[in-house]
Image: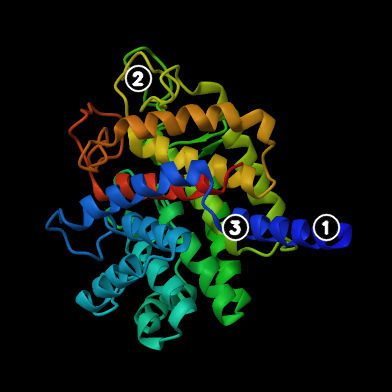
Amino acid sequence: MAKSRYLVLALVLSLFNTFAQKAPSPVAQEIIPLMKKAADWQLTHPTGKPLNQWEYGPFYIGLMSLYNTTHDKKYLQAIKQMGDTVHWEPQARPYDANVLAISQVFLELYQIDGQKKYVDKSRFLMDAPLKRELKPDITFQNNKYWWEWWSWCDALFMAPPAYARLATIYNKPAYMDFMVQEWKRTSAYLYSPSDSLFFRDDRFFTMKSANGMKIFWSRGNGWVVGGLARVMQYMPKDHAARPFFEKQFKEMCYKLKRIQTSSGFWSQSLLDPANYPQKESSGTGFYVFAMAWGVNNGLLPKEDFIDVIKAGWSALKESVHPDGMVGYVQEVGDSPANVKFGDSETYGTGAFLLAASEMVKLR
């Protein structure tokens, strides 16, 4: 009899453990509906811009993270519909890093479905820079061909993760080598080691804010730290350049940790919050994504970052309107500007979805 009771108890515990593993955590039960609400609002409120334009790239990257989190095929279908609409083509601007934001989505979808049409045009475009013999010119100011090299910090989110993933998909180290070479070139030019932050481009080397501070643009640094996280998702841990990327990631995250404002947001002018005190969610979204990813993947100590991440996530929740629109998103630009709760852009929704997908994993 005692043995039977033990067997019954063991069965009950086994069933309970199985259910507990499959049941969404309380955090996920809160976050996933909010993710879906934001994604659904964005899908039903097109901006009128081409779906393969860079502004949409981060949104569909975030939508893919929502699919990976929920496995809701509705969102996978929305991504495929986008691809069919643009004929699986990045915009026809060879050498422009911005056009490869959408290619990140095509490449990830290829890993799911294996259809060559998803990646053929992206790979053709991405091969072109590897064949150039021109002397690099990553100056921005007064350079009418500024987009031909990664001369602005936003580029480090747009192109490098695509090259890192392409290298992994095809087992072609040349793509990873090119990405590392160009990242280091841009970093040597735009990264300020004394500040652990990136200038947006060379126009800002000597520019000062109204209060006499260096201008480090929030979303610009969000692009970079988000790009670092996404590159390292695909870079082998034993890759020779991995320590460089980990070091820069940690330097930036610790700096950002120290300058988060009391509201949980980061100031648009990172070192001069008094100059632009408005809340802004796109930079904050990328910071929460990157820091949560760093904790989830063992690169950042949880005890050092959990309070910062939680405060940032609370700020992001505050940015979501009742209908799902993500507000407080600075408009397209390259420097701090005024922002209102009613301001929204597709890349802001993408940053929110990326942050939320890592918050679901955070324990």
The type of residue carrying mark 2 is: Ser
Q: CA distance from mark 1 to mark 2?
A: 71 Å
Residue 59 appears in the picture as rendered = yes
The type of residue carrying mark 3 is: Phe
Residue sitting farthest toward the front: 1
The image shows residue 147, relative to residue 94, as above or below, that is above
Mark 3, secondary structure of its residue: helix
**Which residue is at the front of the view, 185 or 121?**
121
Q: Is residue 241 left or right of 151 when viewed as pictured?
A: right
**Which residue is at the front of the view, 149 or 68?**
68
Q: Quadrant of the C terminus?
A: top right
- Residue 318 picture location, percent across and down: 33, 29
The image's mark for residue 6 is: 1
Q: Which badge, 3 or 2, comes first in the chain's sequence? A: 3
The type of residue carrying mark 1 is: Tyr
Frontmost of labels 3 and 2 is 3
Q: Write down the residue under mark 3.
A: 19
Q: Which badge, 1 or 2, comes first in the chain's sequence? A: 1
- Residue 195 picture location, percent across and down: 56, 28
Q: Quadrant of the N terminus?
A: bottom right
Q: Write down the residue under mark 2.
A: 209
Which residue is painted at 29% across and 21% down in the image?
Answer: 278
Residue sitting farthest toward the bottom: 116
Which residue is painted at 25% across and 40% down in the image?
Answer: 333
